[in-house]
Image (cartoon, grey):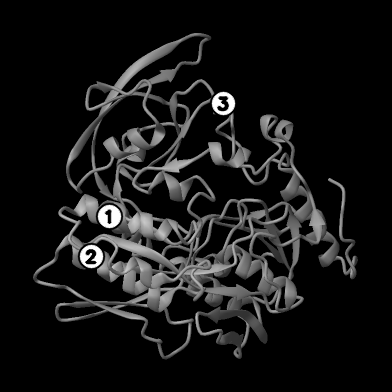
Amino acid sequence: MVERKVVSRIGIPLAFCLFFLGCQTYLTAKEKTNDAEIIVADGGSPTPKLIAQLQRSPHVTPQSTYNRAFKLIKDQYYDQTFSGQDWNRWERRYNGKLKTSDESHKAIETMLASLGDPYTRFLDVDAFKDEKDQIEAHLYGVGMQLGMSPDHKVVVIAPIQDTPAYKAGMQPGDEITEVNHKIIKGQSLDQVVKQIRGPINTTVAITFLRKGPKKDEVSRKEVNLKRAEIPIQAVVTQEILPGNIGYIRLDSFISNKAEKEMKDALQKLDKADGLILDLRNNPGGLLTNAIEIAKMFLNRGIIVSTIDADKYKQSQLQTGEAFYTKPLVVIINHGSASASEILSGALRDNGRAELVGEKSFGKGLVQAINRLDDESGINVTIARYLTPNDTDIHKTGIIPDYKVELKAEDYENNRGPWWVDLKMSNFKRSAADNNDLQLKKAIEVMKKKLAGENKTPATTASK
């Protein structure tokens, strides 16, 4: 997929930022009681259903860590056939063989791989901490969005406002060449990101090249940036487009602040006549966020149904009043996954919004995040979900009402999502530049809705 090449934000793991690698729908809540940490999958219900209580053992061993992982899968995994195997065969497979944490972790990875489920996966200590930080909206770094250019150069896509990088004058297009006076040539984007990240209030030296106003004019600069807490934003863009049409780009559902950010954005766009909600390249996040944001637009109806390991079906309903009632159009593409599909499916199946763009990713499974005794963790698929019309979209995706398929040349000529630039050369694009083909179609659909036209949309529309 072309979209996978584009953006990583410092301090967020690359697998999360590269759109739908590691796409997860998380259904989690957390409570703490003395020395116990409880992670629950609550189905979004007012009374959480306890799935697992993970006691902090004073005598953590590689074997106890493995045993906990085995039991979590046995108790929680949504497919109790365990992909056609006797799960008990794993219980004593490594008895007496696990001497180190690395050996325990490799054994857990081998055990999980037997399920053939890419979403049930092991998280080492760093990955588990990163995932928790994302949910709790904690990020420590210097505040830059980075990308790898076609000629393998690490380029600043944009500094994040009011962060150390922004205050130091970092600009879109700056090419990073050294981190802490060490040349980064030949390194992956992930490797560079890890070097720039670090503990809060520590300093990192960034050396970069900046193009001047004259052709072939390049200057070499260096800044010392003190790392700080960087805001993780779910809503990255909110504005009123020409024609008095509101526009919100929702980047992810992972932060527990996503619901508040969405409500704040809707209030700021209150004077617009209608809203375009952009879920393109949104890989998902907390299921509870998808449910609460759906409620903002619905007066009634089923939002999503989940089916757990016991084949129990539970439906999440909207029984209150919608927060936003004006016309709504949603944009999706191949990178819209999990929670994005829950939201777009709920809005479309309930007749609240029309969808524009490309078929979504197709991830209809729900994971719970579990901490293991040694501070590593595993994500376990605990349920599958259905849209309000009882449609299982796993591996099939959601088909939009108006298809606007993009080709490679559309991305190369900046006709794809307005914030994506594969050439890393045009950093001044905006939602209002009128080049984004899918957004243009969404605006066209919205204008017809506002004019009272197009009551029965065709399945397919041209660009």
**Quarter of the image holding residue 270?**
bottom right
Which callout, 2 or 3, points to the residue nearer the camera? 2
> Of the numbered discs in the image, which one, if any, rests on residue 65?
2
Is residue 404 or residue 107 the one in the foreground? 107
Image point 76% across, 60% down: which residue?
400
Q: CA distance from mark 2 to mark 3?
A: 48 Å
Place of residue 363 in the rendered image (x, y in percent of width and height, measured from the top left): 59, 62
The residue that mark 1 highlights is 105
Which callout, 1 or 3, points to the residue nearer the camera? 1
Indicate the secondary structure of the residue bearing disc 2.
helix
**Left or right: 418 in relation to 410:** left
Upstream in the sequence, badge 1 or badge 2?
A: 2
Image point 48% across, 81% down: which residue?
43
Amino acid type at image mark 1 = His
Upstream in the sequence, badge 2 or badge 3?
A: 2
Q: In what quadrant of the picture does the N terminus appear?
A: top right
> Compared to 316, does 418 lie above or below?
above
> Of the numbered discs in the image, which one, if any, rests on residue 159?
none
Instruction: Tell me, yes or no, whether the two marked residues, 1 and 2, touch with CB atoms within 8 Å.
Output: yes
> Of the numbered discs in the image, which one, if any, rests on residue 425?
3
Amino acid type at image mark 3 = Ser
Q: Residues within 10 Å of mark 1 (few under 14, many from 20)?
A: many
Q: Do we see residue 294 in this rendering?
A: yes
Place of residue 344 in the rendered image (x, y in percent of width and height, measured from the top left): 66, 67
Q: In what quadrant of the picture does the C terminus appear?
A: top right
Q: CA distance from mark 1 to mark 3?
A: 42 Å
Q: Do we see residue 270 in this rendering?
A: no
Image point 76% across, 54% down: which residue?
443
Indicate the secondary structure of the residue bearing disc 1.
helix
> Compared to 238, does 456 lie above or below?
below
Q: How many marks?
A: 3
Place of residue 346 in the rendered image (x, y in percent of width and height, measured from the top left): 67, 74
